[in-house]
Amino acid sequence: MATLSVQMPTSTLSDIDNPHLTVELDRFAWVSIPFTSEAQRWTGGQALTTHWPIEANGREIVGQRLGAYVDDYYHRIHIAPRRLDLGNVVSTQTSPVSLWNAFLEPQTLQSIQGMDEGIEVSGQPSPPLLFAALQERTWQVSVTPNGQPVLDTILEWVFNGSFVAGLHITANRIIPWSFVPDWGDGVLERLIAATDILQSESLASQRRALRIAPRREFEASMYVEGRERQMFDLALFGWGARVWALPIWPDIQLLTAGVPAEADFIPCDTQHLDFRAGRLALLRGESAFEYEAVEIEDVTSLGLQLRRATQQSWPAGTRLYPVRSAQLLEQPNLTKMTDRLYSADVRFLVVEPCDWPAVMPATLYRGRPVWASRPDESEDLTHGFDRSTAMLDSGMAIPLFTDTANRALTRLGQRWIDQGRAQRAALRSFIYAMCGRQQVVWVPTHMDDLTLLATVTSVATTLDVENIGYTRFSNGKPGRRDIRIELYGGQVFMRRIIGAAELSGHVERLGLDSALGVQVEPHQVARISWMVLCRFNSDTQEVEHITDSEGVASWATVFREERDDEL
């Protein structure tokens, strides 16, 4: 250790008259000491002694370098955005992509790799390209509908020194199906659910829905002629197995006002139609060659807010459709009618979720909804019974039949004709709410099942009806104990029969669980029908769109009774 010998200098003399100096400064006094060298000036006149090398008690310190702000941003290549999820691509989609050289020295772009079919890059000179230190450049990356149906690739900018900046691009390339159906035969829509049913010999069942929403199919006939026939032929040949942007034909509407080019809003009706945010819509002209698919940003009561502006102008009267992604279930058979005319039956399966509000009827009976919509009776409707019957047959004696459940379950075939968007939307909501064969509702037979003979007072709990053998064959059994009394004035009463007795060969008296609350005369009754607790007999429901959504559609189904012993 070096030793320094020093001395304290004496106070200096000072008589400087300056009010800005401190008092301490005035206390210094001048000294006059002769020095022979510069070293003696600081050591009190003694020479310095060198003690090199200096030794110390050393120790090792283990540590690591911590990250800093500079490490987060510099000495690398930045790219923004890092991912492009374009969804359904029905027209060319262009997005800006920026690269920043965050090195403090120049870098050279050697190449751009991953240029699959249908990907275009523009906006900058071709590589090799010099990036100055801290320089940023922007490219325009375009994805066209041409190429593989499913795009999932990484576009890479490769720099010297093996530095790579990657852009992950995903998209589904689809082409609009711009051919229109022949409305002479209508358009058939199928809603196909999936239900797992476990049923015992007593006909009690456990029902489980296997799909969140039904699958959706469309079937239609169409004619194509001339130039459209030529394109139809090539479209099926080249892209018959690909995903198409299928217009929902029944939801067509005509624009009441023109839409200019570069417009980001389309004024139109949206209530009860299949427009959805994030999905597509199709504008179509007079031919299959005049169309434009647009992406919906938001659906409002006044129209469609678009994610990207329209590319061309569309006059009033242009057809506007909601669009769903769909595939052909089978390749259509083409019928050659002339050398310029084809006819074809096409069948599409929608390959995206088709959500719709599921709404049951508001009217309830014994805690269950009542489907009381009056069916169309212009065509014959089926009606029957199902039983669980077991047969034991040895092949030699007379077979033995056993009714394992000891009861019959009713089958009701019904058909409805709905007109207008509101009625058709309510029908669709009911089909969705039924979840195929899972849910149950009360369904009246809408037949004249009982005939009232005498006045029913407001406090009476009995009905006198024509003798039809109810006391003998049913007498309060499940399936034939709930009735719906409909008056001409529109009033409806739903009651349960709790007993029956024959008063004569022409009159039976039925006991009710509660009074009607009003006096009812026989001539006021439109019909008294049985009510049974039912589910759909099939998971597939077909809606025939006779005209577009503002017109007429028909729906026919078969209801099958479920046991209601617990109700």
Image (cartoon, rainbow, N blue to C red):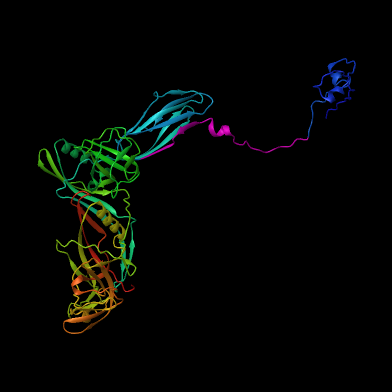
Name the quadrant of the C terminus.
bottom left
Residue 58, magenta (yes or no): yes
Instruction: Using the image as rendered, state which of residue 163 and residue 386 is in the foreground.
Output: 386
Q: In the rendered view of the protein, which quadrant contains the N terminus?
A: top right
Q: Nearer the viewer, residue 156 or 35?
A: 35
Height in image: 242 above or below 38?
Answer: below
The outermost residue toward the bottom is: 504
Establish if 32 lies above or below 264.
above
Task: Name the residue rendered at 25%, 42% in the picture.
Answer: 320
| Magenta-colored stretch includes residue 326 | no
Name the residue nearer the viewer: 400 or 175: 175
Q: Which residues are magenta?
A: 57-86
Depicted 25 relative to depicted 514: above or below: above
Mark yes or no: residue 172 visible: no
Residue 80 percent across, percent down from the top left: 45, 34
Residue 104, given in percent of the width and then of the height, sits at: 54, 25
Q: Position of residue 525 (x, y in %)?
A: 20, 71
Image side of residue 175 versus residue 70, left or right = left
Which of these two is toward me, 277 or 41?
277
On screen, residue 297 versus residue 26, left or right, reads left
